[in-house]
Amino acid sequence: MAAAVVWVPALAAETVERHYSPAYAACLDRAGGVTPEMRFCISAEQERWEAQLNGAYRQAMASLPLARQAGLRGEERSWLRRREHVCASAGDDEAGGTLQPVEIDQCYLDETIRRTLRLRAYR
């Protein structure tokens, strides 16, 4: 019996935000809008989510027959390229300002969360 692919609908920003860790929210509060501190907070949360993403990917791959693993591998590579493309311009509204790198970092975090949630639902 072939496994079905189940997709999580596109997640709005407010939906992604509810997946942020309490440590991330507390870190941002302490950062007080200071760019380097905000970027540190985003980086720490990104590391947490990258670990979850990798675990979800490994689980999804392990659950698939060999014939379908290549498809997921290709999909993951496409997602990585898409994330690069989308997030490269995420801070364009703030071009040249101190918030530009924050917006780019935030994009990577949010896209990583979305992908992790999709992989967790992969069947």
Image (cartoon, rainbow, N blue to C red):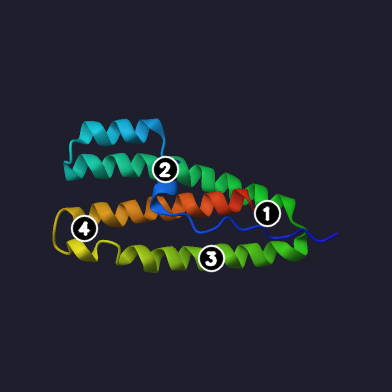
Element marked by disc 2: helix
Please name the residue that numbered disc 3 is placed on.
77
Residue 83 at x, y percent in the picture: 42, 63
Mark 4 and mark 2 lie on one chain; the one further toward the N terminus is: 2
Mark 3 and mark 1 lie on one chain; the one further toward the N terminus is: 1
Q: Could you give the CA–CA distance between mark 2 and mark 3, rounded to whole angstroms?
A: 19 Å
Foreground of the two, 50 or 106: 106
**Left or right: 4, with 73 as reference point:** right
Please name the residue that numbered disc 1 is placed on.
61
Q: Could you give the CA–CA distance between mark 4 and mark 2, rounded to whole angstroms?
A: 20 Å
Please name the residue that numbered disc 2 is placed on.
47
Circle nearer the viewer, 4 or 1: 4
Residue at 47% from the left image edge and 54% from the top image edge = 11
The crowding category of the residue bearing disc 2, from other C-alpha atoms within 10 Å (few below 14, some 14 to 19, many at least 20), is: few
Q: Amino acid at mark 2?
A: Glu
Q: Could you give the CA–CA distance between mark 2 and mark 1, rounded to whole angstroms?
A: 21 Å
Q: Amino acid at mark 3?
A: Arg
Q: Could you give the CA–CA distance between mark 4 and mark 1, rounded to whole angstroms?
A: 35 Å
Where on the picture, by quarter, is residue 94? Answer: bottom left
Residue at 24% from the left image edge and 55% from the top image edge = 101
**Left or right: 8, with 65 as reference point:** left
Whether pointer 2 and pointer 1 mark residues with C-beta atoms closer than 8 Å, the reply is no
Please name the residue that numbered disc 4 is placed on.
100
Residue 64 at x, y percent in the picture: 74, 56
Element marked by disc 1: helix
Q: Amino acid at mark 1?
A: Met
Q: Amino acid at mark 4?
A: Gln
Residue at 61% from the left image edge and 58% from the top image edge = 7
Q: Could you give the CA–CA distance between mark 3 and mark 1, rounded to whole angstroms?
A: 14 Å
